[in-house]
Image (cartoon, coloured by chain):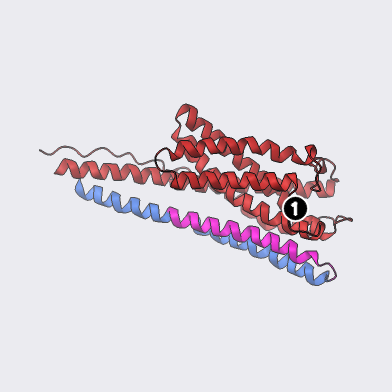
Chain colours: A blue, B red
Amino acid sequence: MKKILLVLTALAAALPTAVLAQETRVRESIPAAPFLAGAYAFMWVAVLIYVALVARRLSRVQSDIDDLRRKLDRDR
Amino acid sequence: MGESPLPEYHPPVTSSQNNAPFAVLLAVSAVGFLAVPFLIVLAPIEPTMGIIQKIFYFHAPIAWLLLLSTGVCAAGSIAYLFAGSDGGDRLAHASAELGVLFGACTLVTGPMWARVAWGVFWTWDARLTSSLLLWLMLVAYLLARRYGGPGAKKLSAALALFAAADAPLFYVSVNVWRTIHPKTTVVPSLGWPMARVFLSCLLLFTIFFGVLLMLRLRLEKARVALAELEIAHEDAREARS
């Protein structure tokens, strides 16, 4: 589930950058496009990094839980 | 000591048991976020500001998420402070983190719009200043929680109430003070071609907020489960010795 979330987030981040870059080529006279694309890309990169950090913390806690569960089961 | 039974451990509800709403929201937000860039590109170009005005379609929704995070954080903190709800505390912690994330995005995307529209990245305008204050209060919440020592949860919950007090100020600042930031009346005055893009983005970003909040709450629940298991493990060791 976490991997799917990461892949989808990466896809969603890549697409607008590509589309906006295309628009930049089409409308070269408008210097605002890099700011628009940059703002959108920043937002997605920030969200992607956050999701990756939460996923990493979650998998670490989950592996600690699994270790402790195994120890408890062994002790029973 | 004889063969004393090991303490009973009841694992909390795990991800496999409550996956359905999360999966649905995840699917909706995934489809939505593939559509958002097309919606933005195809939206009409505003004649005065030109293409840079399209930042509005994601800047305003993430600013709304900053407000929503603050509201959820304050509600959770009230539940913790006045009813002792640990669930409320976990909700407040999760939403404060999201508030810092979306606040940072608001504070970066806004100045990029301002650089083109106003000619400067930043001005000490009432809206910009109150948004920076709100973000700093949420950062203070997380710092107090992490480094506050004993009582950090209560201290950070109190900070969340201060942040909640700033949230309405942040919203009405453009209407109360003289400012160059667009007023809140901009949204109702949008024509339908722009309004439908804005409302779609607002809905999709709000759904995405729900997905992130659920993901972050899973981490909190897993931490509680780990803490319970550690106690059970310690009890088991004591029972054996």
Residue B38, compared with residue B191, is above or below; it is: below
| Residue B42 vs residue A43, the one in the foreground | A43
Picture quadrant where residue B206 is located: top right
**Is residue B237 left or right of B57 when viewed as pictured?**
left
Magenta residues, start to end: A29-58
Residue furthest out toward the right: B47
Let me know if residue A33 is in the magenta part. yes
Percent from the top left, x then y, of residue A71? 25, 51
Q: Is residue B151 above or below residue B35?
A: above
Q: Is residue B177 left or right of residue A13?
A: right
Query: Hey, what amino acid is under mark 1?
Result: Thr
Q: In the rendered structure, does residue A49 fall within the stretch colored magenta?
A: yes
Query: Residue B52, position in %: x, y?
Result: 80, 59
Q: Quadrant of residue B231?
A: top left
Circle 1 — which element?
loop
Nearest the viewer among B1 and B178 is B178
Q: Residue at x 56, y 61 (%)?
A: A7
Q: Is residue B19 visible?
A: no
| Quarter occupied by the C terminus of chain B | top left
Depicted B113 relative to depicted B153: above or below: below
Magenta part mainly helix, strand or loop? helix
Residue A30 visible (yes or no): yes
Which residue has dot 1 on it? B123
Q: Quadrant of the N terminus of chain B?
A: top left
Q: Position of residue A51 (x, y in %)?
A: 53, 56
Asked if residue B117 lies left or right of residue A74, the reply is: right
Q: Please give the count of numbered marks on the rendered protein.
A: 1
